[in-house]
Amino acid sequence: MSLGVCCQWLEPRTKRDGSVVYENSINERTLQLGRFQKGLYTKSTIREVYINNINEIIKLVPKLVANNLKLFRMSSGLFSLAEYNRDIIDNDEQVSLLLTKLGKAFTDAGIRVTTHPDQFVVLSSDNPVTVNNAIKELSHHAWVFDKMHLPATPYAAINIHGGKSDRLAQLIQVVRNLPDNVRSRLTFENDESAYSLVDLLQVHAATGVPVVWDSHHHTFNDANLSLDDAFGLAVYTWKNTGVKPLQHLSNTTPGLENGSFTDRRKHSDYIHYIPDCQRDGVVRDVVDIDVEAKMKNLAVGKLVKLVCT
């Protein structure tokens, strides 16, 4: 059974009043653009932030192993303000060695690593600057995975959405011209309004890029496909990759099922419902599923019990 945690690892902290809160134990540090532009960060400080962030993920691996988790989505914030500090990222020997160490830790543990760059990564934009910036961002993620010695396949998925709607031809053309180490890892995820699974099947047919099916998004934008049919079609897009299909699972918070679009699309704290097709798929170990719930590893732990009942 392969269920994955996204970006954070929650652990309890007891407050002075005796109450317990759950906080992210990954101490990922960030850099602020305003402070950087004012020259308030030295190169040494920036380098220390990057080294800290890699080490924090290295420390996480034993926790994933102890909890029998075989899938982890890395944050896009590993190298904060990366576009302004390529000299450090590209040339620092310790950064390079630590990324190799991190990749080996994941590989030795049999843990699949993926990433999901931010929403501003839009390959179908009408603005060439936006597209160029998106390619730079994707190339950065591919560089990280290369340094980690992860496969140049969608096993190490760099997952994004289709972006601006009604731009299938443009999206296909941009994908065809992507750098090899990006295109070979790229996956597309269906979304709630712009790109349904049916839309992405056309992209797949033209480019070979597989689809990360999100069952929650599908309920908003189903293109007249049942959950079972959508599951099967999405799995089929991975047929020629030699890689187990990746999917996403999240829920609307109970009690908000009749709420606004915004309320319904937000991820709940825990998983309360899993479609039968995904339950069967994960039990038979034919799909890997990222659990997109606010309570992260705690939600995964509860979901294992839900799936096994």
Image (spheres, rainbow, N blue to C red):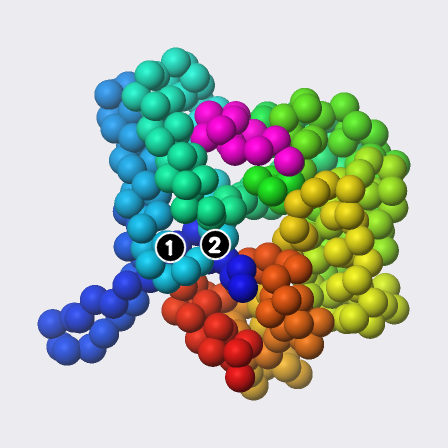
Point 33% across, 28% down: residue: 98
Question: Dot 2: what SS?
Answer: loop
Res 32 → quadrant = top left
User: Which residue is identified by label 2?
Assistant: 70
Of labels 1 and 2, earlier in sequence is 1
The answer to if 148 sits in the magenta stretch is yes
Quadrant of image for the N terminus: bottom right
| Magenta-colored span | 140-153
* Residue 194 in sight: no
Give the mark count.
2
Residues 192 and 53: in front is 53
Point 48% across, 54% down: residue: 70
Instruction: In the rendered view, tell whether residue 44 sits above or below residue 71.
Output: above
Residue type at numbered disc 2? Lys
Q: Is residue 88 left or right of residue 158?
A: left
Residue at the limit of the structure toward the left, as seen here: 16
Instruction: In the rendered view, tell whether residue 195 sits above or below residue 148.
Output: below
Residue 226 in percent (x, y) is at 82, 72
Question: Dot 1: what SS?
Answer: helix
Q: Which mark is residue 64?
A: 1
* Residue 198 in sight: yes
Residue 309 in percent (x, y) is at 53, 84
Q: Residues within 10 Å of mark 1 (few under 14, many from 20)?
A: many
Q: Residues within 10 Å of mark 2 (few under 14, many from 20)?
A: many
Disc 1/disc 2 C-alpha distance (Å): 7 Å
The answer to if 87 sits in the magenta stretch is no
Q: Which mark is residue 48?
A: none
Contact, CB < 8 Å: mark 1 with mark 2? yes
Q: Is residue 123 left or right of residue 22?
A: right
Residue 130 in percent (x, y) is at 67, 31
Res 248 → quadrant = bottom right
